[in-house]
Amino acid sequence: MGMGPLENAVVDAAAEAVAAKAAVGGVGVGGSYAVLQCGEDSEYVRKAYGGYFEVFRALLAEDGERWRVYRAVRGELPGEEEAAGIDGFVISGSCSDAHADDPWIVALVDLIRRQNAAGKRILGVCFGHQVLCRALGGKTGRSKKGWDIGVNCIHPTAAMARLFSPIKLPVHMPIIEFHQDEVHFFAVSFSRFALIKASEMVNDLT
């Protein structure tokens, strides 16, 4: 489960990302990317940012890239020919459950499997990472603790520190969380990048 009442804390990061990219002055290398939107735009995000697609594009897009959106929650997904021309996919948050068998979720799982097999880049955010895990052999479901709402800290693992070695990562990072689902078991190919506590399974925040 993804998009919720704390969305303004997430989407405000888009403005900061735009300013940061302008300051760096980087130039993208091109490419074609698609957002698979798994929830409807809220009135707030639509008025403030033009919709979730614009939020993701502001956060992630580089100069020269082509971005488009498919409303996965409405059953809109790229066909085989379209998908072949897309370099990477971003799967958004959702108010739905990644472990559910709604027709659009089952179709999304199938698309993820095919695109992963084709070597495409896939980024999952909240619900998106849960359904990505499901598609690749992991297991998701309701959190055994119930709802998690508020500020929590995640702790980067050594694997994450190596991946982001040019950046000095803090030992813990406070984040805002709002979810009731989690990943129970990883897909075999997954790596653990962060923990809530060393003794706990990684959940919806990593």
Image (spheres, helix red, strand yellow):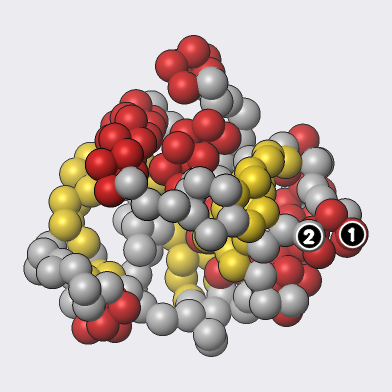
Whole-percent x and y of residue 57? 51, 40
Q: Is residue 172 above or below residue 63?
A: below
- Label 1 secondary element: helix
- Residue 85 circle label: 2
Check the image and name the residue furthest to the left.
171
Image quarter for residue 9? top left
Whole-percent x and y of residue 138? 56, 75
Q: Is residue 144 visible?
A: no
Q: Residue at (78%, 60%) from the top-left corner?
A: 85
* Quadrant that contains the C terminus: bottom left
- Label 2 secondary element: loop
Q: Residue at (27%, 73%) from the top-left corner?
A: 164
- Residue 81 circle label: 1
Q: Residues within 10 Å of mark 1 (few under 14, many from 20)?
A: few
| Circle 2: residue type | Gly
Whole-percent x and y of residue 29? 53, 59
